[in-house]
Image: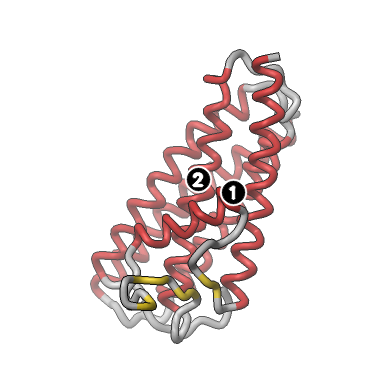
Amino acid sequence: MVGMEAEVPLEKREHWRLAALMVCVQLLDFAVTSKLCSSGELNEAGVAVVQTFHYGSNFLLLFLLSLIVLAVFHPHSRIILPGLTAYLGFALLHLVVNVGALLLSATAKATGLASLWDVGAIGAMSVLTFAACYWMLDRATPGGAFVIPGREGRLPDPKLFDYIYLSFDTMTTFGPTLEVPVSRRAKALMMLQVALAIVILTVLLSRAVNAVG
């Protein structure tokens, strides 16, 4: 996501939607972190890494909110877009850490299918986090990073839900369906999401077999 123009790609109302989206991610992370750290599948170093990223994301969420307030009062500030890019970059790294920690629980003995909720929660975190990244990247890329179809050809002004749908599609079908990435950064993000989706599905299947076996 490096090399974006020094402009604010989102409108004022959209900034608050981005904040609401990432608050949802943070709430999911709170539940997932508690489960991962109490599962007994991680050693002390693993627990420390997961907790460090969780605390770091709490701090950076406040940073995100401060950027949004700055965007409201100083919409042409040059630090807004780099700040949002840095925040989303950390959010992606945090997601990778959580998926890695989840992978260590693939062979854990589950106590029923209801105990698989943390896998679903990390899947939801992936959908929402990548949706935010796609949203920002598409807005900040001249000409757009994606071709999203509408009733009369290309959708001229995709909304947040369109990017959530794009992210959900990529997560569940291991690639875009009707939407077309036209930016190398968009393609790289999709490759990363597909890789994480395969790991999450592998863990889900492994633990589901243990739960019913």
| Nearer to me, 127 or 176 | 176
**Picture coordinates of residue 190 (x, y %)?**
60, 63
Q: Is the residue 130 above or below the residue 201 in the image?
A: below
Pointer 1: residues within 10 angstroms few (<14), some, or many (20+)?
many
Q: Residue at x 49, y 66 (%)?
A: 178
Relative placement, left or right, of 12 versus 80 is: left
Q: Amino acid at mark 1?
A: Leu
Measure how far apart labels 2 and 1 are at the Cα level.
7 Å
Q: Is the residue 104 above or below the residue 160 in the image?
A: above
Q: Residue at x 32, y 82 (%)?
A: 76
Q: Is the residue 120 above or below the residue 187 in the image?
A: above
Q: Quadrant of residue 202?
A: top right
Disc sitting over residue 46 in the figure: none
Q: Is the residue 103 above or below the residue 77 in the image?
A: above
| Nearer to me, 93 or 193 | 193
Residue at image mark 2? 125
Residue at image mark 1? 95
Q: Residue at x 55, y 62 (%)?
A: 176
**Picture coordinates of residue 210 (x, y %)?**
70, 19
Q: Amino acid at mark 2?
A: Met
Relative placement, left or right, of 8 versus 57 is: left
Q: Are marks 2 and 1 in contact (CB under 8 Å)?
A: yes
